[in-house]
Image: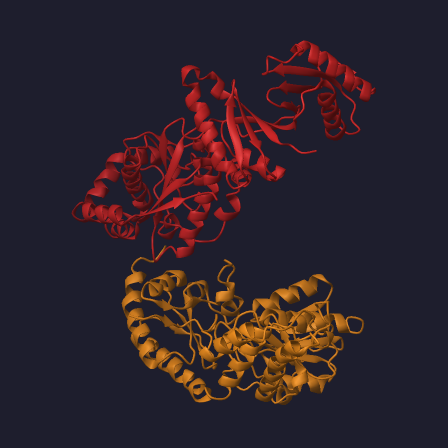
Chain colours: A orange, B red
Amino acid sequence: MSEIYFDNGATTMPFPEVRAIMQETMEAEYGNPSSMHRKGFHAEEYLRYASEVIAKTMKVDPKEIFFTSGGTEANNLALIGTAYAMRRERKHIITSCIEHASIYNTLSFLEREGFEVTYLPVDEKGIVSLDALKEALREDTMMVSIMRVNNEIGSVQPVEEIGKIVKAYDPKILFHTDCIQAYGKMDCLPKRWKADLVSVSGHKIHGPKGIGFLYIKNGTKIKPILWGGNQQKGMRSGTENVPGIAGLGKAAELMYGEKKDQVEKIGLVKEHFIKRVLAEVDNVKDNSGEAPHIASISFPGLRSEVLLHALEDKEIYVSSGSACSSNHPAVSGTLKGIGLTKEYYESTLRFSFSVYNTIEEADICVEALKELVPALRMFKRR
Amino acid sequence: MEYKAYLIKYAEIGLKGKNRHLFEDALVRQMHFALDPVGEFNIRKESGRVFAESEEAYDYEETVEALSHVFGISGICPIVVSEGKEMDEMARVLCDYVAEEYEGETFSFKVFCRRGDKSYPMTSMEVAAELGGRVLDAFPHLSVDVHEPEVSLTVEIREKVYIYSKEIPGPGGMPVGTNGNAMLLLSGGIDSPVAGYMIAKRGVKIDAVYFHAPPYTSERAKQKVIDLAKQVAVYAGPISLYVVNFTDIQMAIYQKCPKDELTIIMRRYMMYIAEYFAKKRGALALVTGESLGQVASQTIQSLYVTDDAATMPVFRPCIGMDKNEIIEISEKIGTFETSVLPYEDCCTIFVAKHPVTKPRLDVIKKSEKKLADVIDGLMEEALNSAEMIKIHAH
């Protein structure tokens, strides 16, 4: 039996085209984009092309794309860069209680630095309350940061409404949205959402690890967090990661181009999977949101790690909660945020799909669950 | 100033009479293990002492660190070597040594001389007196005290001249390999690596057995145990780690025996299995990290019942220690950080809410009879499918 990789929310397998273009940049066009000679210019071409491709997918200006070392850095730059640019006039930031650790922990840092943060609650479907947002807005609010797609359950936030509310209250408040799970799988349109800052990661869309970008709307007041050779207009110093950027550009191009049909089919695999699990496995709870690629299911009566390793034995790879936080024993903020009790959040698995997954794989996984879940429940830890 | 050589002092080896050369050989062997990654050292025994000398460049801190992991060493004296034996040359090197090593300090001293090279034209006393005078001339603020000096400057005249005065404490104990073999029951916890370290310190060569329970314990839990074994191997030398798949035995116990006796029965089967591998390695004892009263399976009644499963002596060096004392050692030997990583081990997977704390041997044995129809097959399978991993510190 070949492996079934249902952990695409953690990372994805790079497209062959991505591997090819990266190899090209490493074998032939290894120049430094800042070099004045031809080798440098050729390397720079890859950056230009990637920015243009990405800008087109988001309907923005290529000059608004700033490459970072990944989603975490993009989120750090968005939050810390804004906080430090606006600290003299404002000090209040609004976010949700189900953000990724790279938002949550960055805001904790800013709180220790003297900024104030409001954490908006979510309903049982993991959707932020717009009323709570309206109430939280203040005269000294500098930024609202709300993710587009939650990484643990796949709930999709109404960013367009959020953007409207924020800008209607005060156009000077910056709106940041973490699109790391959304980009590539859904439309990400900053202008329509009135978003000033959008974070994206490469390896969630079959691109390489170690690369991502932050969309920064022209004219946005933000300070860099890295200092050095002033690459990327001084916003992100450091020699550009040419292979990474080329790979990310290629992945974006494919996700919104050639692979678009396949991307649209990911949701069918997810729906089929959830439907069968709910019908055929006893006593389960579906926590999944609207995102096409993330299914979150609780199996009360057993612990997620045990089921995870049992699936692993059958070469089916999934994650418990969110892979990024699995190394920490701390309980997922998202699962608690949507009101799950211990019995449920300790038994939740995330199945996350990509263009490489099929209905047949979903069926094999369902059969495995039908066999394992009742067997493992017999050995429940008391 | 460059230390070219080290004089290694040892404590308990000195007491071992006719076996002494065995102990010294083991010490030299262990020093080779420890110093191999640092550089090339010539290690030799010389009239009741061991010298390690390097001809090439090496890192001083790294050397002392490596030697401080070798059991049997009570002290490490860094030595300055003088190639010339003429009085003027020796005096110059000695004065340089004092100037640098004791810069700005005031103390009483004496020069102590030893001649390995008996053809040297002066007696030891004459050399000591002459060098002492020269040091005093160079450092008038120092004073000589031949009875109770604060600093003993030792000058040994052999093929070359060795000068030293300071001693860095070693780990003590006895060289690994001088006291037989034992089998350590290694879990991912804090206590068992410490127990392994303590027994190795008494010169015992240890191997280890780990009970793996997939899918209840992950690959990472196993890697954690490998990492711990590696850290223990820094002191204990290479370890053969047996990884035993314990899931089916645990399941059988879970299904057939009273729930509150789960852990104690499991511990007994662990003893049987550990003893099997102990015999295979020629070990004569088992080692566990148990500490009296720490958990239900470590009450005196539980230990009595567990012990009954073993025919070999079971060493429990942590038995009288408090948790914080054990933690102190685990921090010292560098296992603590790994031990507290949050991966499940097989003992914590199935735990009864109220495990029996005062088990009776006859009752437990009766419960075990319920396993009679399956246990032989399961044990055989567990023993035969065990994986052996050779663990080296470097």
Question: Toward which corner of the image does residue A16 lie, by quadrant?
Answer: bottom left
Left-right relation of A238 to A211:
right
Which quadrant holds the N terminus of chain B? top right
Image side of residue A59 versus residue B334, left or right: right
Between A99 and B257, the residue placed more toward the observer is: A99
In the orientation shown, which residue stands out farthest toward the right? B140
Q: Residue at x 40, y 51 (%)?
A: B222
**Residue A234 shown left or right of residue B350 in the figure:** right
Front residue of B110/A87: it is B110
- In the rendered image, residue B309, in percent from the top left (x then y), is placed at 27, 35
Identified at 47% across, 21% down, the residue is B13
Above or below for A197 versus A305: below
User: Where is residue B336 drawn, in percent x and y?
Assistant: 52, 44
Residue A124 in view here: no
Left or right: B262, with B101 as reference point: left
Above-or-below relation of A346 to A190: above
- For residue B293, which quarter of the picture? top left
x, y percent for residue B78: 63, 29
- The picture quadrant where one finds residue A53 is bottom right
In this view, the residue in front, A246 or B353, is A246
The percent position of residue A361, horizontal first and vertical second, equals: 33, 76
